[in-house]
Image (cartoon, helix red, strand yellow):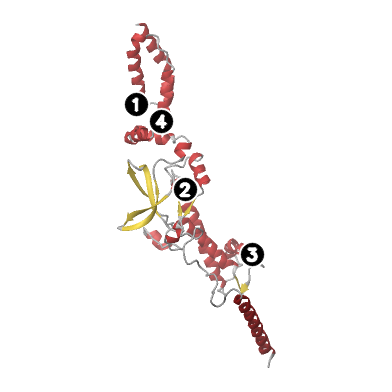
Amino acid sequence: MTIREQFFTLRQSFFDVVAVGFQKVATAFGFPENPGMPLFPQREYFWNKVSLSDELPVRNVRFPPDTNPQNYIEILIGDSPKPNPLPRFFYESKADGFYSFYIENYKNLMFLPNWLSEFLQVRCHLCLDITFLEVCRETVFIMLVTYYYMISFRIFIAWLISINPYSFPIAYFIALVDWIEDASMGLLPVVGGISLATPLLLTVVGKIADSLNHLVFTMPFLPSEGIPGKAIINGDIKNVLIFRYLPILWYKYPIPNEIREFWYSERPDILKYMQKAYENVDIQFLPDRIIKANEFISTLPIYDVNHLGSYIDLKTNLLTINNRVELQELFDSSNSIIHTLIGIFIS
């Protein structure tokens, strides 16, 4: 009997001794009649309730993205990779508000933290127009996909013995990829003469780039304001996240002035709805220039009650000033307004 066979025999004897020992201990607890605790609970308890995410599907997006050339130049050299974000479906309703939207709900969706979303909306004024965020997403996505292809090309030329990767100008290209292999040398094993650092980097870069496809911007709402629900999309009933009513940030902070200006100038129906629906809430819906004009007019004295009607008419005319008149012009003409009022009161 060889040493290898003796080792196998000794190993099997050890396994048998351990198995007998476990059986004797289990017999004291009713084995084999009592099979023990199951690996998975047989019924639902308070600590293993089925969560919402367990019933949601996984959103699968192809990576690297498919090419979609739009002209002959893109056919020859290829088009730039573009992310595939989850679409937002906006709708207007007097019950849910004018800025409500919903998205399909998936298990692998990603959202910004509440504090970061609040910072971007309050400090960076990225509320309704998120074009800048979309451009940033697309820029980072293009950079990651480009680097992904560079890593793939580096792996490809490593198998071509006719190409010296350390000659000019390939050496500069190699330096952009090999730094991770140099940094991880000794930490990751080498299998078949191939380091696992480069394939691992390829996986990490691809995962980060793919995560940008599942990142959802919820402005003007916070991500935590989403309400699970059902909706019909393309004829199918699907799980959705609904963002509706008035965003919570519009309670905590003043509504951006450009939005209030838009309501006052172009969408008076939204302004009337907001003022009526939230009349019991201390929220300012008028634009700043109208508020300052009201404050300015309220400081004008009334000298004669008999001329109160003329004063009210003048105040009404001031409030209906054309929207294109700047507030600075209103203050510059304050002296002439005061003289006009004095003339009315004296006459």
- The image shows residue 143 at horizontal and vertical percentages of 51, 56
- The image shows residue 3 at horizontal and vertical percentages of 69, 89
Q: Secondary structure at mark 4?
A: loop
Residue closest to the far left: 235
Q: Which residue is mark 3?
A: 184
Q: Are marks 1 and 2 in contact (CB under 8 Å)?
A: no
| Mark sitting earlier along the chain (2/3) | 3
Which one is closest to the eye, mark 1 or mark 2?
Answer: 2
| Mark sitting earlier along the chain (1/4) | 4
Residue 155's place in the image compared with 319, above or below, is: below
For the residue pair 174 and 322, the one nearer the viewer reads as: 322
Q: Which residue is mark 1?
A: 322
Residue 87, can we see it? no
For the residue pair 329 and 72, the one nearer the viewer reads as: 329
Residue closest to the far top: 347
Separation of residues labelled 2 and 3 (CA atoms): 38 Å
Q: Which residue is mark 2?
A: 224
**Crowd band around label 3 with a 10 angstrom C-alpha radius: few (<14), some (14–19), many (20+):** some
- The image shows residue 9 at horizontal and vertical percentages of 66, 87
Q: Which residue is mark 4?
A: 287
Name the quarter where the C terminus is drawn: top left
